[in-house]
Image (cartoon, grey):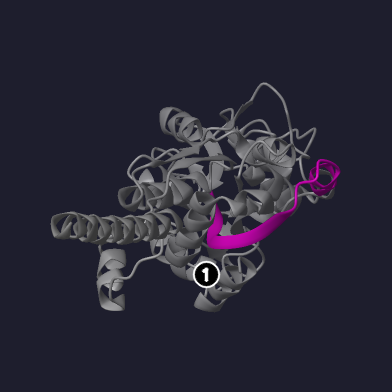
Amino acid sequence: MKKMKRVMSLFAVLSLSFALAACGNGNNGANNATGATDAPSNASSAEQSATPETSLSGSIEIDGSSTVYPITEAVAEEFGKENKDVRVTVGVSGTGGGFKRFAAGETAISNASRPIKDEEAELAKTNGVEYIELEVAYDGLSVLVNPENDWVDHLTTEELHEIFKPGSTVNQWSDVRSEWPAEEIKIFSPGADSGTFDYFTETINDEAQASRNDALVTFSEDDNTLVQGVEGEKYALGYFGFAYFEENQDKLKLVPIDGGKGPISPSAETINDGTYAPLSRPLYIYVNKAFLEKPEVKAFVDYYMNNAADLSEEVGYIRLPQEMYDEGIAKLQ
């Protein structure tokens, strides 16, 4: 009888132990499922600090101005070093071509060498595209001739108008100044989708897109094609952004322009202080607000505005005053 009582007592103790163990295990299971823990707070902090930050990934499509391209490409290259899983594609369809895609919502960012036109802004509005305009650098349109050209010491804005206006009858250099050679001027001009073309024609001919269009003119959206054209023709005349001249100054001759205050050549100083007039201008990027909701796009644009000053100078453009970059950064918040 005593033996039976001991067995029963032992069975009761064991049953109670198993029950307590089961309850303990059940509580631990519930804690794991909800993410709760009974570990000390300092241990939890250590675990959190050891967890790596989430890296950015995805793709960003950019298109537009060939003039702004070198800046954006430099930003994309540096950004890519820190964000290897983000693919940034930069196209060069010209400012107008870029705005067509941007207004349709196809691209996150549009490079532009002029402000957006009313009709482009209206198309964007129709398609529900809201955007932010950001200035990123200054540029000076440069007028170039072949290095063998030893007669042009400068050109006035009036002479440029006579050469480039619609229906121009200036076909030879001697038509500009009688003492110059009686040789045909081979003209190399940005194409109609180029913001550089818009800016130049509006400044020189008083109307954007107003330009001669005859057998003497070669148009191209690619500034490198224009460089090669002027380099290869002794009697050539062309124009494009200052950065492309700096990259190819051993192949080209820069022409000082007289806008009414004497001949002045574009340089970092004359473009920045406005004395190279009237062919100095700001450069832009336009950002689709909807794409800013993507962390990789927001990070890229933030990086762009925080580094545009240095990188624009590295590729031959002129940095803005710092307060203008600060204003751009504030727009993004």
Q: Is residue 128 magenta?
A: yes
160 or 81, which lies in front?
Answer: 81
294 or 106, which lies in front?
Answer: 294
The x, y position of residue 319, in whole percent, is 47, 67
The mark total stands at 1
- Judging by the rendered image, the residue that carries numbered circle 1 is 320
Q: Is residue 44 magenta?
A: no
Which image quadrant is residue 324 in? bottom right
Give the residue displayed 43% in from the left and 44% down from the top.
57
| Residue at the extreme front of the image, as rendered | 1
Give the residue displayed 47% in from the left and 58% down from the top.
304
Q: Residues within 10 Å of mark 1 (few under 14, many from 20)?
A: some
Q: Is residue 326 above or below residue 266?
A: below
The x, y position of residue 248, in whole percent, is 37, 43
The x, y position of residue 326, in whole percent, is 55, 75
The x, y position of residue 274, in whole percent, is 58, 71
Give the residue displayed 33% in from the left and 70% down from the top.
38
Q: Is residue 98 above or below residue 319?
A: above
Q: Quadrant of the N terminus?
A: bottom left
114 or 175, which lies in front?
Answer: 114
Judge whether residue 245 can be spotted in this image: no
The stretch of residues the image draws in magenta is: 121-142
